[in-house]
């Protein structure tokens, strides 16, 4: 086992920045999962599949609008909305009948649902992978103390706080957010005071899934858009939600930070064994805080 | 506890799902059955589709002329989804239920080794079409396995010969943390150390197959300031890695070698977004060698599939030529006689005469080393400054094979 000799301050700073941009994606996806988990009590395994649909839709719309910068921005907005529409239809036609079921039933249902989506994606887009290019001014990189930092990652770093602020505003300042938080604690009581819980649930589900779609849209230009990207993300997203505290959005932020940063810093410090760092962090957190870092809503 | 149940449930569901996948077998007629297990979904399909199509092109020709020894050829393909367990059960299905005469595949080295083991037990000839692990015809070689693609020992030797001529001293190795990645890295590095003893390894990084984000790896490597980098990534990760290399300007900051970087299958999907100046090695280009045989093959392939053939098409063609040629020579459908005929056999191909070495069942293919460059008139990058390294110069010696097999 050899320690890398190149751990300098600029290198460390750069790894932190690169890690934070990965954190952004993880946070966006995990917060959606956590929202649905906290309010609806649904462990949505199909969340990763919606992320995959988001990426594929981004590709389709970007191609449809012409491979221009404007087309890319439009796709980035339209694709998550497309995912939101799909999730709305699914919620109204299927999920809304299942809220009273046991968790194990919901787990099985969402798992089956993820398999169905996986095959649907294969049916619609085929088994080939897609590749999307970011607009010209987001391509390439600039230098931070001699080391390159991709422009697209900087863009991700700006999106992350925006989404976090939006979620804070939604949960704390809007009526639906307040009702949703109340429903997360005691849904019978919320229903008892005359609020239509069913529609609140629908709204929360759609917002959560829309976040998955946004995550997929944002990640589209940086990697292959392909089948299997759903499995990879859902495991990471669940781990993040578990270490953050089930159903707690800020826990998802904390979990994503831990996951993203241990990954990128681990790569610098011990590159040969970097794969295990985020998972080790998960183990350590769960040993000391078995219920997650922040207060779980369960 | 909660996490455990998620996994146990998904696992049992997978098993049930797998049971339904197995399709009912057709009634056995007088046909010659060739089973191909390969990864046809996801990024690796950019390589494997060409193997299948190149192979089927020959099959069509032979079937139109009445088949082999009076039998029509039937090709059965199965998708492994790059998973060893799925691929192995597909191979079992093809061998036990379909009773295939020949097995072919795959791009996943770990799966190729697993199928090779199965074929050894069941005495079914297995032609490895894309896996690059040197173990296939080296340490784990046996009577029933043949490789018609270069492997990590061959590519390693070719790459080392090229890199030894360059002034680089301090290297970094980074790659996929699975069979192929470690094998190609080891192949290049062990040969390079022999050819140029002064080289130094600064460090290594290994990522998981399907790594979603290569940026932190690239930035960490750059901060170590190596002279050159050996990228031991293959199959599905080539394209996203080159994408990340372009986004970070990796190729402009440090020269790097990536075995399959110059191949059409890798460069075509990237278009003009591919990084320039990447050193790569390949068995075949549609534009090289510039011989009549190659031009003729390109024309035939293009007419049939409306695209240029990539290296996989050559492998598919070679598989067909070896398999059907050997059956014709044997004069009857008999596995043992078939194998005796493949051993030492040679065939004509777009890259010239290719011989199947009798001792280790490894096809002796020339290697072409080149650098990715933008070429006017094409909407993707191509290899230029191509250096040809003949097959016999890059093959591991029989003594080396014997040593690997503890003989």
Image (cartoon, coloured by chain):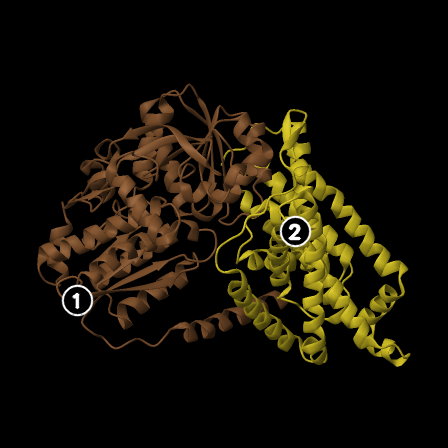
Which of these two is toward me, B205 or A221? Answer: A221
Name the subunit of mark 2: A
- Please state if B341 lies on the left or on the right of B60 as rendered: left
Residue A32 image label: none
Name the subunit of mark 1: B
Question: Can residue B384 be seen by looking at this rendering?
Answer: yes
Q: Residue at x 79, y 51 (%)?
A: A164
Which of these two is toward me, A168 or A270? Answer: A168
- Please state if B73 lies on the left or on the right of A205 as rendered: left
Residue A65 image label: 2
- Please state if B198 lies on the left or on the right of B35 as rendered: right
Return the x and y of residue A151 as percentages of the image width and height.
67, 36
Return the x and y of residue B365 as percentages of the image width and height.
25, 39
Question: Can residue A289 be seen by looking at this rendering?
Answer: no
Query: Hue of chain B?
Result: brown
Which of these two is toward me, B52 or A169? Answer: B52
> Mark 1 packing: few (<14 Cα in 10 Å), some, or many (20+)?
some
Return the x and y of residue A122 as percentages of the image width and height.
51, 63
**Alpha carbons under labels 1 and 2: distance apart:** 52 Å
| Chain for colour yellow | A
Q: Residue at x 12, y 52 (%)?
A: B341
Residue B287 sits in which quadrant? top left
């Amino acid at each position: 086992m050899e320690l890398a000799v190149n751990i300098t301050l600029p290198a460390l700073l750069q790894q932190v920045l690169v890690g934070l941009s990965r954190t952004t994606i993880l946070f966006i996806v995990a917060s959606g999962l956590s929202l649905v988990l906290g309010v609806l009590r649904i462990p949505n395994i199909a969340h990763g599949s919606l992320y995959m649909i988001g990426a594929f839709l981004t590709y389709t719309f970007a191609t449809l609008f012409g491979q221009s910068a404007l087309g890319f921005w439009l796709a980035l907005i339209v694709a998550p909305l497309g995912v939101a529409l799909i999730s709305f239809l699914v919620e109204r036609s299927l999920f809304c009948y299942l809220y009273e079921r046991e968790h194990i039933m919901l787990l099985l249902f969402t798992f089956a649902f993820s398999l169905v989506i996986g095959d649907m994606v294969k049916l619609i887009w085929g088994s080939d992978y897609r590749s999307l290019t970011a607009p010209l001014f987001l391509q390439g990189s600039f230098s931070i103390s001699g080391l390159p930092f991709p422009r697209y990652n900087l863009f991700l770093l700006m999106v992350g706080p925006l989404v976090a602020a939006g979620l804070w505003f939604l949960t704390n300042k809007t009526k639906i957010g307040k009702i949703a938080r109340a429903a997360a604690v005691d849904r019978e009581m919320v229903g008892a005071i005359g609020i239509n819980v069913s529609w609140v649930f629908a709204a929360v589900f759609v917002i959560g899934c829309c976040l998955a779609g946004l995550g997929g849209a944002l990640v589209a230009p940086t990697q292959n858009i392909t089948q299997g990207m759903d499995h990879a993300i859902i495991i990471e997203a669940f781990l993040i939600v578990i270490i953050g505290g089930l159903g707690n959005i800020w826990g998802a932020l904390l979990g994503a930070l831990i996951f993203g940063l241990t990954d990128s810093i681990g790569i610098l410090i011990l590159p040969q064994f970097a794969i295990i760092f985020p998972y080790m962090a998960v183990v350590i957190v769960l040993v000391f805080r078995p219920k997650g870092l922040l207060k779980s809503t369960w | 506890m909660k996490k455990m149940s998620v996994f146990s449930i998904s696992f049992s569901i997978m098993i049930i799902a797998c049971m339904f996948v197995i399709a009912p077998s057709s009634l056995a007629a007088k046909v010659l059955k060739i089973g191909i297990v390969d990864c046809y979904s996801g990024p690796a399909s950019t390589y494997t589709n060409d193997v299948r199509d190149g192979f089927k092109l020959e099959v069509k020709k032979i079937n139109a002329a009445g088949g082999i020894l009076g039998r029509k050829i039937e090709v059965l393909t199965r998708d492994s989804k790059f998973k060893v367990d799925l691929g192995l059960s597909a191979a079992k299905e093809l061998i036990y239920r379909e009773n295939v005469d020949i097995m072919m595949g795959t791009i996943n080295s770990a799966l190729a080794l697993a199928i090779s083991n199965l074929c050894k037990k069941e005495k079914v000839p297995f032609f490895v079409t894309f896996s690059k692990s040197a173990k296939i015809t080296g340490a784990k070689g046996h009577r029933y396995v043949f490789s018609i693609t270069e492997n990590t020992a061959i590519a390693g030797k070719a790459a080392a010969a090229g890199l030894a001529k360059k002034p680089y001293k301090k290297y970094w190795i980074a790659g996929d943390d699975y069979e192929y990645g470690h094998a190609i890295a080891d192949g290049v590095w062990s040969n390079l150390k022999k050819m140029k003893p002064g080289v130094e390894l600064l460090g290594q990084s290994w990522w998981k197959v399907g790594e979603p984000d290569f940026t932190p790896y690239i930035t960490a490597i750059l901060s170590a300031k190596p002279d050159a980098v050996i990228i031991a990534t293959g199959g599905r990760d080539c394209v996203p890695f080159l994408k990340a290399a372009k986004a970070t300007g990796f190729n402009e900051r440090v020269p790097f070698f990536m075995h399959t970087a110059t191949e059409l299958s890798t460069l075509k999907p990237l278009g003009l977004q591919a990084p320039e100046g990447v050193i790569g090695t390949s068995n075949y280009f549609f534009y090289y060698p510039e011989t009549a045989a190659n031009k003729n093959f390109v024309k035939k392939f293009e007419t049939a599939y409306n695209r240029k053939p990539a290296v996989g098409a050559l492998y598919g063609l070679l598989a067909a030529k070896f398999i059907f040629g050997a059956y014709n020579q044997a004069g009857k459908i008999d596995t043992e006689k078939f194998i005796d005929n493949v051993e030492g056999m040679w065939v004509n191909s777009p890259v010239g005469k290719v011989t199947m070495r009798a001792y280790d069942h490894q096809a002796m293919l020339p290697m072409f080393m080149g650098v990715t460059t933008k070429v006017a008139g094409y909407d993707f990058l191509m290899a230029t400054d191509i250096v040809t390294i003949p097959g016999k110069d890059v093959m591991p010696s029989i003594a080396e094979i014997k040593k690997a097999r503890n003989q």
